[in-house]
Amino acid sequence: MVSSKDVDKAFFDALGIELKDKCTLKRALSHRSAASGWSGYERLEFQGDRVLGLAVADMLLESYREENEGEIAKRHAALVQRQTLADVARDIGLGDYIFLSEGEDSSGGRDNPAILGDVVESLLAAIYREGGMDAARAFVLKHLGPRMEACSAPPRDPKTSLQEWLQARGRPLPEYNLVDRNGPDHAPIFTVAVQVDGEKPLHADGKSKRAAEQVAAERMLERLTA
C-alpha cells in the first residue's frame, strides 16, 4: 500500500485535534484497495456518517433557531454532501495521508471526491471514538461552521432548481433512472442517470438514490447553464 506522508504535527494542526489511537487512525485513512484481510475505512465511514449527521444537525439547530425544519434540512443536505466533505479534505491536506494501492494512487485517488468524502467521515468516527461527541462537534464546527455561515439563505434543492429552470423555458421535466447499485450492504453506492429532452444522459453516484439524483440534477443544471 502507498501513503505519500506519515501523519505529522502539521496534519493534526490542520485537523484541530491530535489522535493518540494510531491503530484506529490508520484504519480511518486506509482505502480498501490498500487493506489486506480487512475492509479499510468502510466500517468507520459507516459510523462517521451518522456522527456527522447528528453533529451538523446540532450546529444548525443552535445557529438558526427561527428557521423551520424544511429550511434546516436544506442546509443540512448541503453541508453533508460529498463535494462539501471533499472540499474539507482538501483544506486539511487529507489526500496526502490516505493509504491507497499503487493503482488507485496512480489513477488520481488522492483527489477523488468520493474517497475524500468517505475518509472525512471515517476520520470523524475515529475522533468520536477517542474523544466522544464533544470532540466530533468541535471538528464539525471548525471545518463546516465557516461553510454554514457563508450561506445566508437556505440553499435550494438541485432537483427543484433544475425542474424550475426547465419549466420556465417550456421544456419537459427531467427523468431519473436508477442505473446501478453496488458496494457492501451497509454502505451501498447508487448510480442514477438524469435525462433531459435534447441532452445526453448524465450519471452521478450517491449513498442513496435521492442523493445521487441531487448530484445528477446539479450537474445537469451546470451543463445547461454553462
Image (spheres, rainbow, N blue to C red):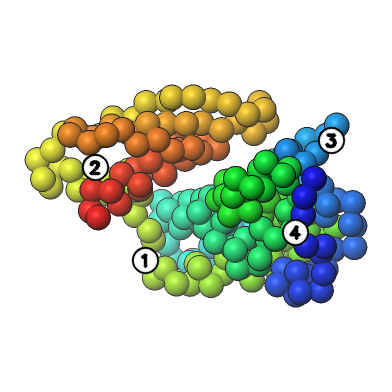
Locate the N terminus and report the quarter of the image it occupies: top right
- Please give the residue where the numbered disc 4 appears in the rendered image: 4
First along the sequence among labels 4 and 2? 4
Per the model, the C-alpha gap separating discs 4 and 3 is 19 Å
Q: Give the distance between the C-alpha atoms of the residues marked 3 and 2, in whole angstroms.
A: 46 Å
Which circle, 3 or 2, is nearer the viewer?
3
Read off the residue under disc 3: 36
**Mark 1 neighbour class, 10 Å CA radius: few under 14, some 14 to 19, many 20 or more:** few
**Residue sitting at x 56%, y 33%:** 189
Foreground residue among 106 and 144: 106
Q: Mark 4 falls on what kind of element?
A: loop
The residue carrying mark 2 is 163
**Disc 4 and disc 2 in contact, CB within 8 angstroms:** no
Of marks 3 and 1, which one's residue comes earlier in the chain?
3
Q: Residue at x 22, y 36 (%)?
A: 199
Name the kind of residue labelled 3 in the image: Ser
In this rendering, would 52 be left or right of 161? right
Question: Which dot, 3 or 1, sits closer to the camera?
Answer: 3
Q: Are marks 3 and 2 in contact (CB under 8 Å)?
A: no
Image check: 48 left or right of 161?
A: right
